[in-house]
Amino acid sequence: MKINTAPHWQKVSHPLLSQHQTELWVRYTPSDNPDISGNKLLKLKYQLELALQQKYQGLLTFGGAFSNHLLATAAAAAENNLKSLGIVRGEEADKGNPTLAMCQSYGMQLLPVSRSFYQRRHLQDSIQQLSREYPGYLIIPEGGTCEAAVRGVSELDLRHTPNGPASMLLCAVGSGGTIAGLIQGAANTAVIGIAVVKDQQLPDKINALLPASSQRSNWRLVQALHQPAYGRFDQKLWQFCQSFAGQGLELEPIYTGKALYSVFELIRRGDIPQGSRLSFYHTGGLQALKGLAYRGLIPTAGFER
């Protein structure tokens, strides 16, 4: 797995940005394999390093049937000659959907489990049970989020745009690992996370991922300002995502598109000061578009299997 260390920046154009004299820069972290790009690339970096150094035979992780993390883990394991096992939420999981089919193409063994078992996946008893049943596998939390993931993301320089230092860093927030890494690497730059899940414990989870010395007050969490429930989006949000295609900026409406929509609303409401230079982290996850098309939630044109 090779990380492209060259900064991949794009300046976004929009009448609202011009009106508010605001610069918006989007940064993406590509790799030589698009299935491991974005924040997953950084989250898995040190967990892969650990697996290889300690000679684990495989990686075991968790996710829903259309999980970006499951696919990234399967691809990363295959590239490093490791086995992989995916614990999939829901015994009725369709293994023929594009995401799980790609996981299987990388050699990942899929194990659909009941939702009640999946809800207990973080408990010590469940982890010990999996360790006994699958010895030799490094267990990676859902979304890859752990201290090693935070360390990987913290190495991303999101503060220095091609046009100068950013006044604010922004990203979508699901499990909290990405924003924790950005906070740790932000120095004194303000960080705003757009929560695309409804989880009242999310601030506490983020703080728990930060070393005591890195728990700062320069960040805040904002609930997504349109379709805040996880995985929900409407035609308005999808059209917003599509509106940037002409600039070569591809978005999906579950994470990055929903978060970017909220950024524009914050600018519109005056919650982000005029004259700001914003640095937005595109966390990837574009494979999700195939899954949305598979389920008939977006047009299938361009996503044929």
Image (spheres, rainbow, N blue to C red):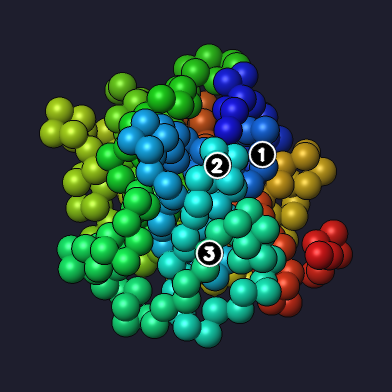
Secondary structure under the numbered disc 2 in the rendered image: loop
The residue to which callout 1 is attached is 33
Q: Which of the image's four quarters has the N terminus? A: top right
Q: Is residue 67 left or right of residue 13?
A: left
- Number of numbered discs present? 3
Residue at 82 percent of width and 43 percent of height: 246
Q: Residue at x 30, y 45 (%)?
A: 146
**Which one is earlier in the sequence, the residue at label 2 or at label 3?**
2
Q: Is residue 278 left or right of residue 10?
A: left
Q: Nearer the viewer, residue 130 or 247?
A: 130
**Callout 3 environment at 10 Å: few (<14), some (14 to 19), or many (20+)?**
some
Residue 266 vertical placement versus 92 (above, below): above
Q: Nearer the viewer, mark 2 or mark 1?
A: 2
Please state the horizontal and vertical placement of residue 99, each as a whole percent of the image. 63, 63
Please give the residue where the numbered disc 2 appears in the rendered image. 81
Q: Quadrant of the C terminus?
A: bottom right
Please state which amino acid type lies under the numbered disc 2. Asn
Q: At label 3, which amino acid type do we have? A: Gln
Identify the disc placed on residue 109: 3
What residue is drawn where x is 67% and y is 42%?
34
Q: Amino acid at mark 1?
A: Asn
Query: What separation in Å lies between label 1 and label 3 (alpha carbons)?
Result: 20 Å
Q: Where's residue 8, x and y in %?
A: 64, 26
Verify CB contact (< 8 Å) between mark 2 and mark 1: no
- In x, y percent, where is residue 21? 59, 29
Crowdedness near tag 2: few (<14), some (14–19) or many (≥20) residues, C-alpha within 10 Å: few
Res 183 seen here: yes
Q: CA distance from mark 2 to mark 3?
A: 14 Å
Up the image or down, 60 lies above or below 26; here it is below
Residue 51 in percent (x, y) is at: 38, 39
Q: Earlier in the sequence, mark 1 or mark 3?
A: 1
